[in-house]
Image (cartoon, rainbow, N blue to C red):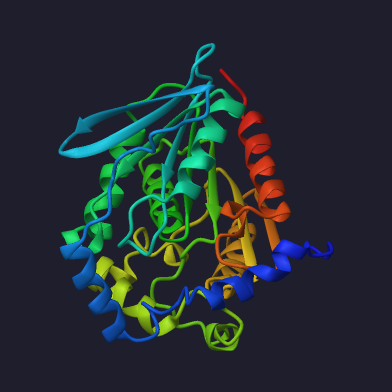
Amino acid sequence: MSSEKMSVLGKLMPSIMKWRKANKNYVTREAVRLHLDHLVLHPRSTSAPKRHRPGVRVEAAMVEGWRVFTISPVRGRSRGTIMYLHGGGWIHEASSYHWKLIEQLAEETSSSVVMPVYPLAHEGGTAAGVVPFVARLSQQYSGPLTLMGDSAGGSIAMSASLLLKNQGCSPALTVLISPALDLRMSNPEIDTVQALDPWLVKRGQLELVEMWAGDDVNDPVLNPILGELGGLSRLLVFSGTRDILNPDTRLFVEQARGAGVDVEYHEKAGHIHVYPLLPIPEGKQARRQIVQAVLRIPIP
């Protein structure tokens, strides 16, 4: 765990989230259902932002009925592919924070970043349908592959990494940002952290998990913490301690290291869910570490 002094903005983030009532749609199962009713009536845009970093170009194509964005550096050839799975509780589209990160990755790592618009839980999307597609899509691109995702997208990325490993074609690197790694959410430490988390709520998350994974919650690929971790390629993992997903992340990292996996783990005391995406100094540092990890991948 990092013992670095927290920035002022980092310290303020929990209070900002409380002020914004970031957890209001997740405090109960009923709140989740009402929020989903709203999303069905008012779906959020899946379009790319109108403005982009000047060093990247954004293209979109349809692949097996999915809209898939490719964000590439304008100059030079791509040195590899990053498959990014955005978070959002399996019910929200990519946010401006996701777009800022993937555009930074494309430019600073000279990689093509592929971000599929996967079907969300209230649109019929499920782990059993999305994960195999992501694995197939990942194999369509050239160069070293990085699988990356945050929160719910971290669960998809890790499951796809396990599936590809089982198929004998592991990615070069898997990056997990505040990932959901045990969809059962049965770790008793979650209840202790709940009082500190200003954003995620276990009751609401369980409603979403049941929609997303259903009877597959005990599948050793679709629920990553149950997977056979031996033989996985390098992992880079980020987590904050004011996040109910942190206890399972710690446990997963311990299990992966015990299985002989090369894991670089960054845990920030006092920080909230997906802190690497946030406009705070610690987030900037994490984004720089992700860029450096991708740049360290050998190019054949």
> Considering the image in quadrants, where does the N terminus appear?
bottom right
Most distant residue in the top direction? 76
Q: Position of residue 92 (x, y in %)?
A: 33, 59
Residue toward you, 100 or 61: 100
> Considering the image in quadrants, where does the C terminus appear?
top right
Residue 244 seen in the current view: no
Q: Is 225 left, or right, of 8 in this rendering?
A: left
Q: Is 36 left, or right, of 289 in this rendering?
A: left
Give the quarter of the image for residue 84.
Answer: top left
Tell me the residue at 55%/60% (across/down).
Answer: 274
> Is residue 215 positioned above or below 238 on the image?
below
Q: Position of residue 237 (x, y in %)?
A: 60, 54
The total number of labels drawn is 0
Q: Position of residue 183 (x, y in %)?
A: 39, 71
Tell me the residue at 64%/36% (across/down).
Answer: 291
Residue 191 seen in the current view: yes
Q: Position of residue 25 (x, y in %)?
A: 36, 77
Tell me the residue at 59%/71% (across/down).
Answer: 16
> Is residue 64 positioned above or below 89 on the image?
above
Q: Is 174 left, or right, of 253 in this rendering?
A: left
Tell me the residue at 37%/25% (across/down).
Answer: 141
Residue toward you, 80 or 269: 269
> Is residue 250 positioned above or below 291 on the image?
below
Residue toward you, 292 or 275: 275
